[in-house]
Amino acid sequence: HRLSGPDGVAVATTVLDAANDPAQRLGAAQVFVLPRQALVKGAGYHATFDGTIDGNAFSRSFSFQPG
């Protein structure tokens, strides 16, 4: 995964999955990406995720602006 800020620089994150989710709510095919610092309201961010599911590669990306 990669989360980048409006300047293109990577944002430090923590990733939770089924193995390290303290609430034990995530399933085997789920992840939760948390920025380590607050994001800037109204700034543009870009997220990219690459991985495999059942041996099939995938890539997803999206942009967003925190409200």
Image: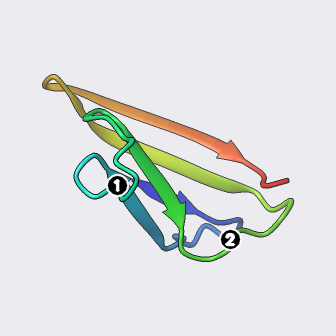
Furthest-front residue in view? Answer: 23
Task: Give residue 27's position: percent from left, percent from top.
Answer: 31, 35
Task: Give residue 4's position: percent from left, percent from top.
Answer: 57, 63
Q: In the figure, residue 36 lies in which quadrant? A: bottom right
Q: Is residue 57 left or right of residue 30?
A: left
The answer to which of 29 and 52 lies nearer the viewer is: 29
Select label 1 or label 2 by which is in front.
Answer: 1
Q: Is residue 40 left or right of residue 58?
A: right
Residue drawn at (69%, 73%) of the image: 38
Q: In the figure, residue 62 lies in which quadrant? A: top right
Establish if 56 lies above or below 65.
above
Separation of disc 1 and disc 2 at Cα?
Answer: 30 Å
Classify mark 2: helix, strand or loop: loop
Furthest-left residue in view? Answer: 55
Task: Give residue 58's position: percent from left, percent from top.
Answer: 32, 29
Establish if 42 lies above or below 57.
below
Residue drawn at (78%, 55%) of the image: 66
Amino acid type at mark 2: Asp
Which labelled disc corresponds to residue 7?
A: 2
Classify mark 1: helix, strand or loop: loop
Amino acid type at mark 1: Asp
The structure's colour scheme is rainbow
Q: Which residue position is annotated with label 1?
A: 21
Question: How many residues crowd mark 1 within 10 Å: few (<14), some (14–19), many (20+)?
Answer: some
Which of pointers 1 and 2 lies earlier in the amino acid sequence? 2
Task: Give residue 60's position: percent from left, percent from top.
Answer: 46, 34
* Circle count: 2
Residue drawn at (22%, 52%) of the image: 19
Q: Is residue 4 left or right of residue 67?
A: left
